[in-house]
Image (spheres, helix red, strand yellow):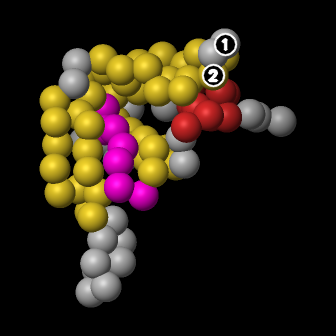
Amino acid sequence: MADIFHLAERYLDRKVIVTIDKDHGFEGVLSAVSRSPPGVWLSAADAVIFRSTLANPLPQIVSRHKKSEIFINLNSVQRMEILPSE
């Protein structure tokens, strides 16, 4: 049975969006997965802000702030989305 770590390791070097809460997240390349502490490393990362409206309830990225590398603890992650490869 696969756990979240095996699933994340399968997508190393792929672009992902990690949602921290309904308005904030990070977009970057998944570069490493850590078990202790549980988390993921993103390289070429951007901090992103999401917005949704009544007319368009699906959250859209409205703002980006450049970051280089960032560690995100999995205890604070609500969602991780793998983006299609180019």
Highlighted range, magenta: 22-28
Is residue 37 rendered to the left or right of residue 15?
Answer: right
Looking at the image, which residue is at 38% across and 32% down? 14
Q: Position of residue 79 (x, y in %)?
A: 52, 49
Q: Is residue 71 magenta?
A: no
Q: Please, what is the three-letter code of the amino acid marked with disc 1? A: Ser
Residue 73 position (above or below residue 36): below
Q: Which quarter of the picture shows residue 26?
A: top left
Q: Which quarter of the picture shows residue 57?
A: bottom left
Q: Position of residue 77 (x, y in %)?
A: 53, 41
Is residue 77 rendered to the left or right of residue 14?
Answer: right
Main secondary structure found in the magenta portion: strand
Is residue 1 rendered to the left or right of residue 35?
Answer: right
The residue positioned farthest toward the bottom in the image shown: 55
The residue positioned farthest toward the top in the image shown: 36
SS assignment at label 1: loop
Q: Residues within 10 Å of mark 2 (few under 14, many from 20)?
A: some
Q: Pointer 1: what residue? A: 36
Q: Is residue 25 magenta?
A: yes
Looking at the image, which residue is at 30% across and 71% down? 52
Q: Residues within 10 Å of mark 1 (few under 14, many from 20)?
A: few
Q: Pointer 2: what residue? A: 38
Q: Which quarter of the picture shows residue 16?
A: top left
Q: Position of residue 27 (x, y in %)?
A: 31, 38
State the CA–CA distance, disc 2 to disc 1.
5 Å
Which label sits on residue 72?
A: none
- Marks 1 and 2: in contact by CB < 8 Å? yes
Looking at the image, which residue is at 58% across and 32% down? 74
Q: Please, what is the three-letter code of the amino acid marked with disc 2? A: Pro
